Image (cartoon, helix red, strand yellow):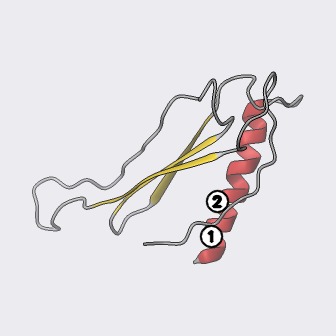
């Protein structure tokens, strides 16, 4: 099992007080198949819809054994309660997360 680099993201939702600011959902590592198999899984992506009544930001992690770790980020439009463009904000958070994972190598 690998180590998870935790990024602190301080968020507030409009209209209610969230019980947490983000969720990490990790389906783990999947065996992609034998090296000599006719077909082999080399990449897996996992995502889920934004949580309207839950956490404002969700990080969805999945990987194939021996391959890259994939991470998607989901949110409901308006749930981040920020004035800047939400896509740009999530891009910055994602870049910080990527840098953190790179520092583990």
The residue under label 2 is 98
66 w.r.t. 28: above or below: below
Locate residue 70, reporting x and y percent. 48, 53
Q: Quadrant of the C terminus?
A: bottom right
10 Å neighbourhood of mark 2: few (<14), some, or many (≥20)?
A: few
* SS type, badge 1: helix
Hey, which quadrant is residue 13 in on the image? top right
Which residue does the image show at 74% across and 36% down from the upper left? 18
Does the CB distance between marks 1 and 2 fall below 8 Å? yes
Q: Which residue appears farthest toward the bottom when viewing the image? A: 105
Hey, which quadrant is residue 68 in on the image? bottom left
Would residue 27 appear left or right of 50 to someone viewing this image? left
Locate residue 21, reporting x and y percent. 72, 44
Most foreground residue, 63 or 1: 1
Which residue does the image show at 71% across and 59% down from the upper left? 7
Residue 102 numbered tag: 1
Q: CA distance from mark 1 to mark 2?
A: 6 Å
Locate residue 20, reporting x and y percent. 71, 44
Most foreground residue, 67 or 23: 23
Which residue does the image show at 25% across and 53% down from the upper left? 41
Q: Quadrant of the N terminus?
A: bottom left
Which residue does the image show at 15% across and 66% down from the upper left? 34
């Amino acid at each position: 099992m690998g180590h998870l680099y935790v990024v602190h993201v301080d968020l507030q939702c409009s209209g209610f007080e969230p019980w947490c600011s983000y969720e990490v959902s990790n389906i783990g590592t999947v065996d992609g198949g034998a090296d000599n198999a006719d077909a082999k899984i080399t990449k897996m992506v996992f995502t889920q819809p934004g949580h309207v009544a839950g956490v404002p930001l969700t990080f969805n992690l999945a990987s194939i054994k021996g391959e890259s770790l994939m991470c998607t980020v989901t949110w409901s439009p308006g749930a981040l309660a920020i004035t800047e463009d939400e896509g740009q904000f999530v891009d910055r958070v994602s870049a910080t997360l990527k840098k953190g994972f790179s520092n583990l190598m």
